[in-house]
Amino acid sequence: MSDSDRLSHDVQRYLDGEQVEHLDAGERAQADSLLAAIETYASRLEGPGSELDGAVMQAVRVKPVPTAHGSWWQWLLQPRVVSVRPALAAAAAVALLVVGAVGVSLRQRAGTVEPTAQAEIVLVRFELRAPEAEQVTLAGSFNDWSPEGIELVRSPDTGLWTGTLPLSPGEYEYLFVIDGISWIPDPSAHAQVDDGFGAANSVIVVGPRGVVRS
Amino acid sequence: MTCITPIHLDPATDHFTLLATRVLMMAALPFGSQGGLLIEGAKQSDGKLVRRILAGETDLYRILVERYRREFGRYAAAMLHGDSDDAADALQEAFIRAYDGLASCKDPDRFKAWLFRIVSNQCHNVRKRRRDHLSLDRVEDPAHNPADQDLERKEIGAAVGDALDKLSAEQREAFVMKHVDGRSYAEMAELMGVGEDALKMRVHRAREELKKHLKGLL
Amino acid sequence: MKPVTLLLITALAAASMAQPMHAQQVSIREQLIARGAPAEFADQVAAVVAAAEAEALPTEPLVSKALEGWAKRGRVPPERVLAVLSQTQASLRLGREVTLGAGFDPPPGAVVAAAAGALGRGISREQVLDIMTAAPEPAGAATGLTVAAALAAQGLDRPAAVKAVRDAFRAGRSPDEVLEFPSAVTGLRAHGESLADVARRILEGGGLPMPSQQGMGPQAGRPPGVPGSQPGQGSAKKKGQSNKP
């Protein structure tokens, strides 16, 4: 490197952001134009977008809780949430009666599926672990995305928030809303899709026999 | 709508602290304002999040992913010829490995530095795989009508990227952290586990190389 | 959960959903204003929806997207919402074109919307036509497309996703049965099959098993894919293959 390529000690300190008295005007100009060039380069740099987050969580979601030993048998013992119709047949029957009464007025918001002659209603359970939240609601295509419409109920010991919705078979997009502020996907949903606004929506497809989640 | 079960918050336990600014934005939002809120609504420390994830609340990992995608995203792009797709590959791999090995992060409060090591390694790996692929053209704005000034800026941007490419890995990394991320030497020392003096030397040398490359353009 | 609690929850949920029913007869403009949107924004949205209606496009996807965008306004500026609506409209036009191409005349709104959604999730035009042709009736086409798109979003290879739906229809399965597929996939994965395994099974003609009645009845506890619990698994068994646990 020739001498003209060297940067003086003062210039280096200046470029480090330090206060330098008596910096020669020529050197200052040199330093400033270097900074400008770097800024030109840096301003065009773009990191990856938010779709990365979903891709990582999708990969990570099927893994067990990280442990020091990562034993495969611990993976087998991991509890999985399987939600279909509640096993409480009596409660289900009673609930369906209630739903039946208002069922006629339920909007057939089953995504793109036309209601069949006898649109069955299926009870679908939603749950989220959020022990520190003060409020968890559901917002989605089943309720016009109203973030305050459907409140989940918290179990005091486990910090698990749950709710059960009567839904017609079909596809639904939705998110959990925590404390009215954080919109969070459902890790146990069938899939996550682009919401078109730069984030993700959770998707479930409800069949006539319910939903099996991960 | 009222809840069926009244929620009693125990003041002794942790709870989400809502940043006042975010609550204000939600409450009195003049619709013309740009939201820009993170999905993450609460500012929990890395250490707390890591401990909760290891305790089983694995969904919280997403908060760390978003946090550090933003923090390290441009660093990764700069280390990979400005290619944000390659940066995405490197970061994705890094996050997955970090998750797998999370229990071996000995000090969860220093998660950032621990993660940075993994990110840096993955950037090296991806870079080696793509050795022949120079994608300086990715660093451009396709919508623009190239005026003379813009062409000149593009040329300068490309030249800087070119110059960075020719640096040693250590000089490049230090330079990027100083001039792209705007970190202090103290912060860099903390993240990279290298002394401040050594880092200063790397950055100073890198600048001189850069100046050499940009001769005639400045 | 106590039966009474369950009852209350569903009643509350139903009550909250009864609101949208009323809202169905209310215009999107009024819905937005009722939710606090500024009149100018509501007008612009209404204009997009009206234009779509004039083109005989289904408006439900636009209405839903507009309400979603407004609900997410903390993060989404109004210009973005309008831009997304305009993209949605364009995708509906594409969906309509393909639906017409499949011979549906007039093209049912639900099918158009489902086609638009499937195309938007990377299902190709040919694949969409495939499903539409195989489906038993228009309602089935909409369901089949929605399910194929959902399977693809779950991570299943697109050819496998499309084949699963198409083969099911050709084998006489109803749209209701096809709706169970995404659940079937998560069920299989919970038992250790990878997406690649599932895709291979489909492409080799094995199809997706119907989820057995989990949690209820004598079949409870039998995971899907276990020999004997599904018809058509016999051949696999004869070859001496054991299903994965």
Image (cartoon, coloured by chain):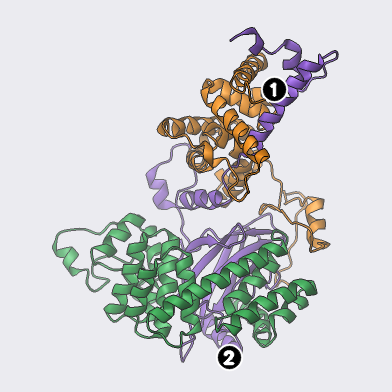
Chain colours: A purple, B orange, C green
Residue B109 lies left or right of residue A28; in this view the side is left
Q: Quadrant of the C terminus of chain B?
A: top right
- In x, y percent, where is residue C71? 69, 68
User: Tag 1's secondary structure?
Assistant: helix
* Residue B185, numbered circle: 1
Residue depicted at 46% across the width and 50% down the height? A59
Q: What secondary structure is marked by label 2? A: loop
- CB-based contact (under 8 Å), mark 2 and mark 1: no
For residue A13, above or below residue B48: above
Q: Position of residue C40 (x, y in %)?
A: 78, 73
Residue corresponding to mark 2:
A104
Q: How many marks?
A: 2
Task: Pick the residue in front: C171 or A61.
Answer: C171
Q: What is the three-letter code of the residue carrying label 1?
A: Tyr
The answer to whether residue C141 is visible is yes
Q: Give the residue type at disc 2.
A: Val
Residue C161 falls in image quadrant: bottom left
Which residue corresponds to the image point at 81% horizontal and 51% vertical from the top-left?
Answer: B21
Same chain for mark 2 and mark 1? The answer is no
**Is residue A137 visible to us here?**
no
Quadrant the N terminus of chain B occupies: bottom right
Q: Is residue A194 above or below residue A141?
A: above
Tell me the distance, in whole angstroms, between the alpha carbons under discs 2 and 1.
67 Å
Is A29 placed above or below C50 here? above
Q: Chain of mark 2?
A: A
